[in-house]
């Protein structure tokens, strides 16, 4: 990765870390929220081979508008309009109930730009891996619903990066096996 791109991505990571500094993943044994943002960005680079500046900046910033006091104008001024536009596309309205937000993700998936689609696919993959790996106080039904929602969203947006699509498919197969294991342990 070119030095100037790495420097810009690291600047976005520091900004995101400051904005999310007091946030923890819900139920994830108090893991810093920043871990998720780094996992998404790293997977886009390592698995997807992505090097587009706006895409990578948006990846590390993708939850900052919905979860912090950051503004679109602030992002656009510091990281460029293209990255800010991608973040805006991926921003859920947190005033809407959880299940409705997930339904809207499915309904609006095909309207996403290509960079936003790539981030959404990796976001769903990393969330699935976390939801089914870390201690989380979600009932199995909610975990299954998240898997189903992820499949519905990704089926509408795949095709922009075959490696990311394949990783999502591998994640889904792993998630299905993991859910079966969890169901068996609950039955015992």
Image (cartoon, grey):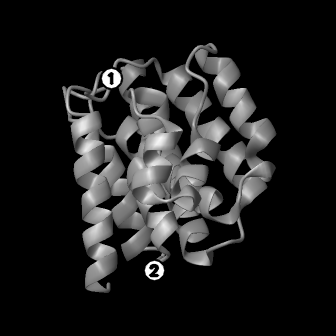
Label tally: 2
Marks 2 & 1, CB-CB < 8 Å contact:
no
Can you identify the residue that label 2 sits on?
49
Q: Which mark is residue 72?
A: none
Assign the N terminus to one quadrant of the image.
bottom left
Q: Is residue 132 visible?
A: no
SS state under label 1? loop
Q: How busy is the neighbourhood of tag 2: few (under 14 within 10 Å), some, or many (20 plus)? A: few
Residue 32 left/right relative to 178 = left
The answer to whether 82 appears left or right of 66 in the picture is right
Question: Where 129 falls versus 21 (above or below)?
Answer: below
> Would residue 138 be seen by someone viewing this image from the given angle?
yes
Query: Left or right: where does residue 118 sit relative to residue 74?
Result: right
Tell me residue 146's x, y (percent): 57, 33
Residue extending furthest bottom?
2
In the displayed structure, 13 sits above or below 130; it is below
**Residue 8 place in picture, x, y as percent:** 31, 67
Residue drawn 22% across and 51% down? Answer: 14
Residue sitting at x 39%, y 65%: 43
Q: Using residue 182 as the reference point, say whether residue 66 is left or right of it.
A: right
Nearest the camera: 34 or 64?
A: 64
Q: Position of residue 143 (x, y in %)?
A: 50, 29
Closer to the camera in the image, 175 or 29: 29
Count neighbours of disc 1 (C-alpha within 10 A) and say few if under 14, some if 14 to 19, many if 20 or more. some
Q: What residue appears at the point 35 percent right and 18 percent down from the top-left corner?
A: 137
| Residue nearer the viewer, 177 or 147 | 147
Q: Position of residue 30 (x, y in %)?
A: 19, 26
Of callouts 2 and 1, which one flags the residue occurring earlier in the amino acid sequence?
Answer: 1
Q: What element does badge 2 sit on?
A: loop
Q: Which residue is mark 1?
A: 26
Q: Residue at x 30, y 44 (%)?
A: 16
């Amino acid at each position: 990765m070119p030095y100037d791109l790495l420097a810009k991505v690291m600047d976005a990571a520091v900004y995101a870390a400051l904005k999310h500094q007091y946030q923890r993943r819900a139920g994830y044994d108090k893991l810093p929220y920043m871990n998720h943002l780094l996992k998404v960005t790293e997977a886009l680079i390592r698995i997807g081979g992505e090097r587009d500046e706006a895409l990578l900046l948006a990846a590390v910033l993708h939850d900052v508008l919905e979860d912090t006091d950051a503004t679109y104008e602030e992002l656009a001024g510091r990281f460029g309009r293209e990255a800010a536009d991608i973040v805006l596309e991926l921003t859920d309205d947190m005033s809407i109930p959880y299940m409705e937000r997930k339904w809207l993700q499915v309904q609006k998936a095909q309207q996403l730009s290509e960079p936003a689609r790539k981030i959404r696919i990796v976001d769903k993959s990393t969330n699935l891996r976390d939801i089914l790996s870390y201690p989380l106080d979600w009932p199995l039904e909610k975990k299954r619903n998240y898997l189903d929602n992820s499949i519905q969203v990704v089926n509408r947006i795949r095709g922009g990066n075959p490696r990311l699509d394949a990783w999502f498919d591998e994640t889904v197969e792993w998630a299905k096996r993991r859910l079966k294991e969890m169901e068996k342990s609950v039955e015992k």
